[in-house]
Image (spheres, helix red, strand yellow):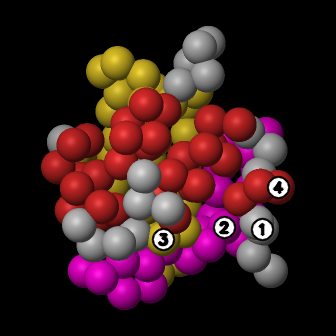
Amino acid sequence: MTIKPAKLSDPAVRAFVNAVNSHDREGLLHLLAPGATMSDDGSDRDLDEWLEAEIFSSHGHMDVQSESDGGRALVADYRNDAWGEMRTAWRFTVDDEGQIARFETGQA
């Protein structure tokens, strides 16, 4: 059963999912801490390049199926124009200012 983004527990993660799903580049970038990092399937990637390729230019969308760790770990059906749909796991590190310092994603 899909969890509506408004029901997600962590405010930063909730805002991240909303920004991805509405293709809000400015909003998503505002959520990221200075120097934020990310990894995909265990490999660190260039954050800006990854966001452009996997979210913005390919119309990424997250349908969250479950959350854990206070809302900072998600399992979501993720789809975009490049890869179609796949079950993915997401883990977020949120700093003291409420910004996302790191996220890790990969196939679940």
Q: Amino acid at mark 2?
A: Val
Query: What number is the disc on residue 3?
Result: 1
Q: Which label's residue is closer to the chain start, 1 or 3?
A: 1
Q: Amino acid at mark 4?
A: Lys
Report, in whole angstroms, how far the alpha carbon at label 1 lies from the one at label 4: 7 Å
Q: Which label's residue is closer to the chain start, 2 or 1?
A: 1
Label 3 sits on a secondary structure element that is strand
Q: Is 86 situated above or below 68?
A: below
Report, in whole angstroms, how far the alpha carbon at label 2 lies from the one at label 1: 5 Å
Closest to the camera, between mark 4 and mark 2, is 4
Q: Which label's residue is closer to the chain start, 3 or 4?
A: 4
Quarter of the N terminus within the rendering: bottom right
Q: Is 73 situated above or below 78?
A: above
User: Viewed as shown, does residue 79 lie left or right of 63?
Assistant: left
Which residue is depicted at the point 35% across and 27% down?
36
User: Disc 3, disc 2: CB below 8 Å?
Assistant: no
Residue identified by numbered label 3: 61
Residue identified by numbered label 4: 7
Residue 89 in sight in this render? yes
As for residue 64 lying within the magenta part, the answer is yes
Label 4 sits on a secondary structure element that is helix
Which residue is depicted at the point 37% across and 41% down?
26
Crowd band around label 1 with a 10 angstrom C-alpha radius: few (<14), some (14–19), many (20+): few
Which residue is depicted at the point 62% across and 73% down?
63
As for residue 70 lying within the magenta part, the answer is yes
Residue identified by numbered label 2: 64
Extent of the magenta region:
63-85
Farthest residue to the top: give it: 96
User: Disc 1, disc 4: CB below 8 Å?
Assistant: yes
Label 2 sits on a secondary structure element that is strand
